[in-house]
Amino acid sequence: MKKLLIPFLILAVVFNAAAGGTQQTGSATGSGSATVTPVPYPANPSPLDSSAKIKYYNLDEVIEYRSLSRYSEPDYVTALVNQGRLPPVAQRLPQAPQVIKTSFMSDGGGTYGGVFANVFAATLEGWNFVGGQSVGWFGVEAMYNVALLSSGPAYLRKDKNEPFPALATDWTWGDNGRTLTMNLIRGAKWSDGEPFTADDVIFTWEDNINDLNVPGRSRPATWEVNGKPSKLEKINDYQIKWTFAEPYPVYLLWAMADDRFAVGAAHALKPLHPKYNSSSTYLKYREAYAPNAIPAPTMGPWVPAQYRTDELLVLKRNPYYWKVDSDGKQLPYIDEVHFTYSTNSLTRTTNTMTGTCDISNVGEGYDDVARRASDPNSPFRVDWQGDSHGYGMDFNFDSKHGVATDQDRANRALFRDLKFRQALTLALDRDGIAASLASGPFYRSWGGGLLPASPLFTKESVVFLPHNVTAANALLDSMGLRKGSSGYRQYPAGSGNVSGRDIEIQIIAQQDLGNMIDIAQAAIPMFQAIGVKLSMKVLTTAAIDEQTRVGTWDMKMTRYDSPQLVPNAFPFALSPRDDQIWVPHYRIRTSGDALPFETQLNDITSRFAIETDAAKQKQAMFDYNKAFTENCYNIGVVSVSYGMLLNKYMKNVQPGLAVNVYSWGHQSMFMEQLYFTSDQQAKRPLILGNNLPLSYPVVK
C-alpha cells in the first residue's frame, strides 16, 4: 500500500470540498432537481504492454496425446518402485499421456529436482474445492485443481480461439451443434492411485454443480443456453456427452476449462456427500477435507503433503501425474512447491524481489519494483502489461437477501436509486486516486464495465461521469437527503428506526489486496464532501466470501479481470442471470427484485453468448457497456497495468507470460515444465527429501 501519498490525497480532498469542489465539468441545477452531464471517456491505454513478446503456436506444436516407447522418472522414485511401494512408471501413466513437446519449451527439456517457492495470502479452508472450500488461491488452486479443459495458456494459440485439452483429450460437435461428445484421458489415475473416469465428472456435475445446497464455483445457470438447462451424461468410463438447447454454445468450452468445472475425486468425496451418507450434512460435506487432511487426492502435478496453519504449505511431486515430455520424462520437473503464508499479497512481490519467491502478479508497489528491476544484479525480471485489470466498488442491490435491519433496508433502497449511484460516482476523484497509488503510467481513471484492454472495448460505449462535487450534492439534494447538524445527510422519512439519522455505509476490502484498502481509504473523505459517511472494514477472503453468501454487506471493493477482459469466455459472469452468480445481486431470482436495466443486461449477454458474427458480438458488447455504465452498475475507479514478476533463473517460462487473460499467471503456463539448473536447485533445500506422499488418510 502506498502509505505516503494517500494521506496527502485525503487532505487535498477535504480542502477542495471546503472550497466548493474541484472539477466542474458536469452541470447541476437547483436543490429540487439535478442534471448529470457525462464527458468523453479519457481513454489512455497503457504504454507498458509486453504482449509483443508472445510467440503463438498451433495446438499440435505444443501438446499431443500419445504413447511413447519408454518413460523415465527421478531416481528416488525408481527406488520406491524397486522397494515395491509404487508400480512402475509405465503402469502409473495413462495409455496415451499428454506429451508437452520439448520443442515448445523455451529452454528445452528440464532437469529433475529443486523447489518452486511462492507466497499465499488467503485462507486455506480445506481440500474439498468442488464442495465450496477455498484451497488458498495464489497458485495453490492452479496446482491442486484440474478441469476438463485448460483455459490459461489459450492466449498462446494461433490456430483456434479455444481452450487446451486436459482431462478431456478431444471433442466433437453433433446434431448441428446441439450435442458435444468428449473423450476423456484413458488410464489416468488420481494421486492416490485410484482411476480417473467419467464417474468423477458426473459426480462433479450432478452432486456439486447441480446441487444448490453445495456452494461451489458454478451453478446450473452457468451452463444454461439461452435460459434453458444443459444436460451431461456418461456414455462409458472414458466418454461423456453434453446436450444443449441451442446450437454451438462454444462459450461453454471456457466454463469447462477453469475452476467452474474443476473435477472432484468421487471415490474420496462421494461417501461424504449427504445424498449418499445419511449421517452427513451439507456443512459437514463442505468442511470434510480439513487443511491437515493430507495428502488429498489430486490430478495436479504436485500433492498437498505438509501444512502448518498460517505458516507453510508444502506440495510434493505427484507420482501418478499424467503428463510427460517428448523424451518420456514424467512431469513435473520440479520436486517440491513451498507456499509461505502471509496476510498481505505484497509479501509475494517483496520475496520475489529478494529471490525467495519465484512469481508475483505486480498490481501494487510499482515504484519499488521499477527501481529494483533496473539493477542488473537483481534476481528477478518483470514484464509490464496493458490495462488488463480494474478496481472498483460494488453495491449490494438485493432488497431482501441479507436485510436484517432498517438500516440495511434503507441502504439497499439508496443503492437501487440511480441518482444516489451517480452522486457517489461523481464524488470520486479518480485521477487523484490513480496518481496516489503509484508514480508513472500504471493507473488510469476507469469508467467501469469492460476493461480498456479488451478487444471488445470501445471508449464510445462508456458513459463517463467526471469528478464533480457540486453536481453530486445537487443530485442528493434532489432526492430530499438533507444534511443534519453533523454535516452528514440523513435517511429520509419512511426509513423505519433510522429515519432522520445520518446515512452510514460500510465498504469491505480484501485484507491481502492493498490497492483495495488504499482506494477505500481515499473514498472516505470524498464521500464526506457530499455528506455521506463511509467506513471501511478489512476482511480476509474467506470472510468476504461468507458475507457474500449471507448478503450482509453494503458496498465492496472489487478487482475486475478476465470476464471484463475476454467476455467471450465468461458471458454469463457479466450479469445477474441467477442466484449465486452475480455478487452485487446474489439472490436475484429468489428475491425477485431485478431492476429493469439488469434484465436488459441479461438479455444482451444471452444474445452475445450464442452470437458467432464478430461485428454483432462487438455491437452487443457496445450495448452492454453503455447500459452498464449509464446505470452506474458499479463505480469503476481505476484500470491498472499489472506486471509479471519472475525469478530470472527459472527455466521454461514462455516469453510474454500473461498475468491474466483467461486465467492467472500460474494457470497461464504449463507449470510442470518449469525447472531450475542444478546450481540453482542447491540454493533451496527440500523439506520432504525423498519422501513421497503415499499414505492417504481416511476422511469421514
Image (tube, rainbow, N blue to C red):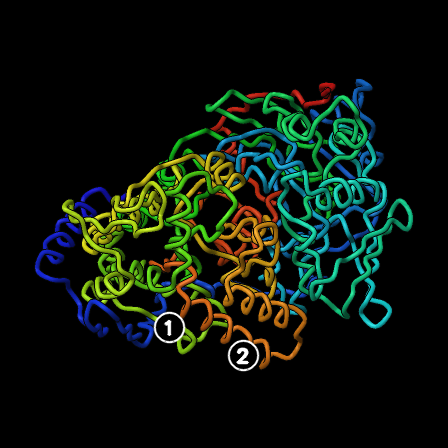
Check contact, mark 2 vs mark 1: CB within 8 A. no
> Considering the numbered disc 2 on the image, is that residue within a helix, a strand or a loop?
helix
* Residue assigned mark 2: 619
Q: In the image, which disc is placed on residue 463? A: 1
Q: Nearer the viewer, residue 471 or 540?
A: 471
Q: Which quarter of the image is occupied by the N terminus?
A: top left
Residue pushed farthest right? 236
The answer to which quarter of the image holds residue 20 is bottom left
In the image, what residue type sits under mark 1? Val
Q: Nearer the viewer, mark 2 or mark 1?
A: 1
Residue at the farthest bottom position: 615
Give whichever of 601, 203 is nearer the camera: 601
**Above or below, comparing residue 211 to residue 164 in the picture:** above
Mark 2 to mark 1 CA distance (whole Å): 16 Å
Q: Is residue 451 left or right of residue 691?
A: left
Is disc 2 surrounded by few (<14), some (14 to 19) or many (20+) residues within 10 Å? some
**Residue 446 lies in what quarter of the image?**
bottom left
Identify the amino acid type marked 2.
Gln
Determine which quarter of the picture holds residue 632.
bottom left
Q: Which mark is residue 17?
A: none
Image coords of residue 6 (percent x, y):
21, 47
Which one is nearer the viewer's eye here, 518 or 353?
Answer: 518
The quarter in which the C terminus is drawn is top right
First in sequence: mark 2 vs mark 1:
1
The residue shown at (72%, 26%) is 77
- Give the side of residue 323 with respect to residue 527, left or right: right
Compared to residue 272, the image places residue 174 above or below, namely below
Q: Position of residue 342 (x, y in %)?
A: 41, 30
- Residue 131: percent from the left, percent from the top? 66, 36
